[in-house]
Image (cartoon, rainbow, N blue to C red):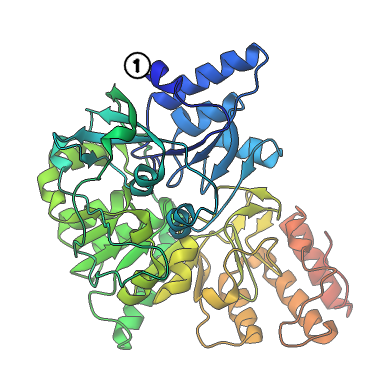
Amino acid sequence: MSASEAAALIPAGSNVGMSGFTGSGYPKEVPAALAERINALHADGFDFKISVWTGASTAPELDGALAAVDGIEMRLPYQSDPACRARINAGQMDYIDIHLSHVAQFVWFGFFGKLDVAVVEVAGILEDGRLVPATSIGNNKTWLDQADKIILEVNNRINPAMEGMHDIYYGTALPPHRKPIPLVTPSDRIGEPYFRCDPSKIIGIVETHAYDRNSAFTPPDETSRLIAGHILEFLAHEVKKGRMPENLLPLQSGVGNTANAVMAGLEQGQFENLTAYTEVLQDGMLHLLKRGKMNFASATAFSLSPEAVDDFNRDVDFYRERVVLRPQEISNHPEVIRRLGVIAMNGMIEADIYGNVNSTHIRGSSIMNGIGGSGDFARNAYLSFFMTPSTAKNGQLSCIVPMVSHVDHTEHDVQVIVTEQGLADLRGLTPKQRAKVIIQNCSHPSYRAALQAYYERALRESPGRHTPHMLNEAFSFIQSWKAEKAAMEVEKAIHSGLAATKVPA
């Protein structure tokens, strides 16, 4: 049927599970047709909204189209669309930001209510009804299992040679009947290459011919290269100390230019026979595989530039032997991450002087994207890095602050903080020791004196001295003040003997 006919089968108020993870494998036409229908109904005075569940972020054709017509009542578990973000922060759309490893099991537990409809992109349908997965797995297995009704988008633009690259594990169960997941290396295949699907639940099939949202990556800038350099130097030090093997441990890397800069550094560096156990496979890991630096990569989705897509399609037979895509409940499974000893590298918005990390909110109340899988990996990794430039807003804001405005990753889950200024190894340090090394190694010089002055006053004036804070000043760095003015005022106060003067907000 047409996309419009399929969209007409989705009722108002329904919970709809859609495929898609970080811009890959999302339905291309049904959401857009649904947005047109919603817009027409709204124009006629009818209220029509749905709740949208996905694997992670999708694309303008899905999140953007539905948000633009005010068609989403509630969104989970992760988004990165500007229109979605604007409505969420305006209070016009509800949003549940949760760990990606929790989504499938929470749906199985019934925590979110019934899943009414699934809209899932696939690469093909076999004669026996099994489905060939597309460029992401995400939560699709759960959507197909749990939804009352299913609409399939069969995208014939997907390279058919991808068939066999997927590993769909059907061994999960509800407590108290769970069993260990038999995965002990990133290259283990423990499931099936296809989705199982009850044909009686399929209410529509839409044929499509469209590429994923493929965004070109900005070449690494000097800041990204410096951050990557600090991480690579640290990993070499860990190998020299005997704390990890010469080929490191499985790598996990978040999405973005800094992550790709780390991969570029690994491509030129000393390490061989690398592996990856991650969520998203980006350009950098494809390059490592192609160069022979990396032997195998496990993920749940691709997120590639147009050039990398061309390379992948040209050499898909090569990559099919070295890449596996899994459901995100497996790619992000805390127990598997801990067993494999993953090295986790994720971005952040800000960190405070004691090592707490905010990776989701601007000034404590406005969501940026979401926690994604960073919490799954950070808490369970063998080694957990969080990375950011030391300043934002052209230097007007420090990304190292006295106290983060929102906590996603507590100091207990953060082992290493990295900016272009340097690296702070927090393992085995007390809160006061952490503060000293973070301020000295990671803060920007324009803010270092102010941070140090705050910390020294807190040592004297805080009611408790284990994690010294002055709560009336703790958020001063977030109140959009100029770095030069603040540093100058603090320096003036110190030199005049007025070290107790507040940092101006």
Q: Is residue 160 left or right of residue 383?
A: left
The residue sitting at 43% across, 50% down in the picture is 256
Nearer-the-camera pick, 312 or 93: 93
Could you tell me if residue 311 is visible in this image? Answer: no
In the picture shown, does residue 439 fall above or below 346?
Answer: below
Residue 201 percent across, percent down from the top left: 34, 34
Q: From this viewpoint, which residue is outermost toward the top?
A: 44
Find residue 304 and report its image quarter.
top left
Quadrant assignment for the C terminus: bottom right
Q: Residues within 10 Å of mark 1 (few under 14, many from 20)?
A: some
Mark 1, residue position: 2
Nearer-the-camera pick, 275 or 301: 301
In the picture shown, does residue 292 fall above or below 57?
Answer: below
The residue sitting at 28% across, 39% down in the picture is 198
In the picture shown, does residue 390 fall above or below 335?
Answer: above
Residue 34 percent across, percent down from the top left: 48, 22
Find residue 309 and report its image quarter.
top left
Residue 435 percent across, percent down from the top left: 64, 79
Nearer-the-camera pick, 202 or 59: 202
Q: What amino acid is labelled 1 in the image? A: Ser
- Total tally of numbered discs in the picture: 1
Q: Secondary structure at mark 1?
A: loop
Quadrant assignment for the N terminus: top left
Could you tell me if residue 129 is visible in this image? Answer: yes
Q: From this viewpoint, which residue is outermost toward the front?
A: 200
Residue 204 percent across, percent down from the top left: 33, 25
Nearer-the-camera pick, 25 or 322: 25
